[in-house]
């Protein structure tokens, strides 16, 4: 199989990259915002819950809006709403405003996250899982820059806000550059509003949800771990999140190539093993020289959970990719909201080091889900559709 990238493919990649920049810059920004607000980890974790609520609201609406308006308007509108949320998030240190800004930004950005996989699966057919992984590789690659920009802005005494607001002009440029490019509309059962998804889909949903929870826990709390356990200053600690996100970029890029040759389940089992080893080293060490490569290993492992997990779920949806992706969005919302908040609350009670044991528990959940919902040996995907929005 080969992956042919056209103008729509590249535009879709870059649109997802915009949300990646916000999302992966959000974790280190949150650590610095907590210092300004003087709040506990549990209260700071409410920002992760706000992301989850925004994502959940988007997930409940995404499939209906796609059926009614088409995929392209939903993505463009989502990016505009995300930018409005970013402005509100950075405008003040007042907790209600920052929580609302996080919610609005996640609400808009989540439409992009949920619409991109069906677009790529429909556009690229059997190469769809590779395209989804590659799109998320680019998003993670862009996200790798975000913690570095935040850390550099802090070191230069500019504060973290200009680093986050840098995204707004990029979104504006993409909106102009993407004029006239239309995504394929859902067809067949995918164009229906109702219906039930099969049991095998929900088992796949459990796998990807557990993986997303691990990703959010590490992205949102790595900076605090590096400050508390390793002893880094706030700026370098914020920049250390790049180790996770950089590993994710590499993992998704390599995973996209491997998805053209190997079954999704085999790749996901390998991801679980690598994440487990990387996390064990990260959890046990107090040395930055060991913690950083361990975080890279974690990033490479967790990189595959979302793109290959959502492709796996779409494969199991029996021809309803937009509905399947929207339901994954609900799982992502639950994972993003409950995972970091529970970890933050446990950290306030027992310390962040012990609270991080939530991560291996989630790895067990993912392993059980893979075992219960095995896919066929050869990867498959939805057929390409030439229809346009």
Image (tube, rainbow, N blue to C red):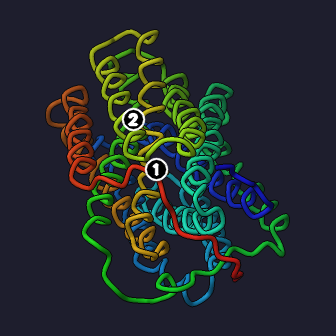
- Judging by the rendered image, the residue that carries numbered circle 2 is 271
| Tag 2 secondary structure | helix
Residue 328 place in picture, x, y as percent: 39, 64
- The correct choice, above or below, for 230 with respect to 45 in the image is above
- Which numbered circle lies on residue 367? none
| Tag 1 secondary structure | helix
Seen from the viewer's position, the closer of residues 100 and 14 is 14
Residue 312 visible here: yes
- The correct choice, above or below, for 254 with respect to 67 in the image is above
Quarter of the view holding residue 99: bottom left
Seen from the viewer's position, the closer of residues 85 and 336 is 336
* Mark 2 vs 1: CB contact within 8 A: yes
Residue 366 place in picture, x, y as percent: 27, 45
Mark 1 burial class by Cα count in 10 Å: few <14, some 14-19, many 20+:
many
First reached walking from the N terminus: tag 2 or tag 1: 2
Residue 283 place in picture, x, y as percent: 29, 21
- Judging by the rendered image, the residue that carries numbered circle 1 is 308
Seen from the viewer's position, the closer of residues 83 and 273 is 273
Residue 48 place in picture, x, y as percent: 38, 52
Q: Residue furthest left?
A: 349
- The correct choice, above or below, for 295 with respect to 92 in the image is above
């Amino acid at each position: 199989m080969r992956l042919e990238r056209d103008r729509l493919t590249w535009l879709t990649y870059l649109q997802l990259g915009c949300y990646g920049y916000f999302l992966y810059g959000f974790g280190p920004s949150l650590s610095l915002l907590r210092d300004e607000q003087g709040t506990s980890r549990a209260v700071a974790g409410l920002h992760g819950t706000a992301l989850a609520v925004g994502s959940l609201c988007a997930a409940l609406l995404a499939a209906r809006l796609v059926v009614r308006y088409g995929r392209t308007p939903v993505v463009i509108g989502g990016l505009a709403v995300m930018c409005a949320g970013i402005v509100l998030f950075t405008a003040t240190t007042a907790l209600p405003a920052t929580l609302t800004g996080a919610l609005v930004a996640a609400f808009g950005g989540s439409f992009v996250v949920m619409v991109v996989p069906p677009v790529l699966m429909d556009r690229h057919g059997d190469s769809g899982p590779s395209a989804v992984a590659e799109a998320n590789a680019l998003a993670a690659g862009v996200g790798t820059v975000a913690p570095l920009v935040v850390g550099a802005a802090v070191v230069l005494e500019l504060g973290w806000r200009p680093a986050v607001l840098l995204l707004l002009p990029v979104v504006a440029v993409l909106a102009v550059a993407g004029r006239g490019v239309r995504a394929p509309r859902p067809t067949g059962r995918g164009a229906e509003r109702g219906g039930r998804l099969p049991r095998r889909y929900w088992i796949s949903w459990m796998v990807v949800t557990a993986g997303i929870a691990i990703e959010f826990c590490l992205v949102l709390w790595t900076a605090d771990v590096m400050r508390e356990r390793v002893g880094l200053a706030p700026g370098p600690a914020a920049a250390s999140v790049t180790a996770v996100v950089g590993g994710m970029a590499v993992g998704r890029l390599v995973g996209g190539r491997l998805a053209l040759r190997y079954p999704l389940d085999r790749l996901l089992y390998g991801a679980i093993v690598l994440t487990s080893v990387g996390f064990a080293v990260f959890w046990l060490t107090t040395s930055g020289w060991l913690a950083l490569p361990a975080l890279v290993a974690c990033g490479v492992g967790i990189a595959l959970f979302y793109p290959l997990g959502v492709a796996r779920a779409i494969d199991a949806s029996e021809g309803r990719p937009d509905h399947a992706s929207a339901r994954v969005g609900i799982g992502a919302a639950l994972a993003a909201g409950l995972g970091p908040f529970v970890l933050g609350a446990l950290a306030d009670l027992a310390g962040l080091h012990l609270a991080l044991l939530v991560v291996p528990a989630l790895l067990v959940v993912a392993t059980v889900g893979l075992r219960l919902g095995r896919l066929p040996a050869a990867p498959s995907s939805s057929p390409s559709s030439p229809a346009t929005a």
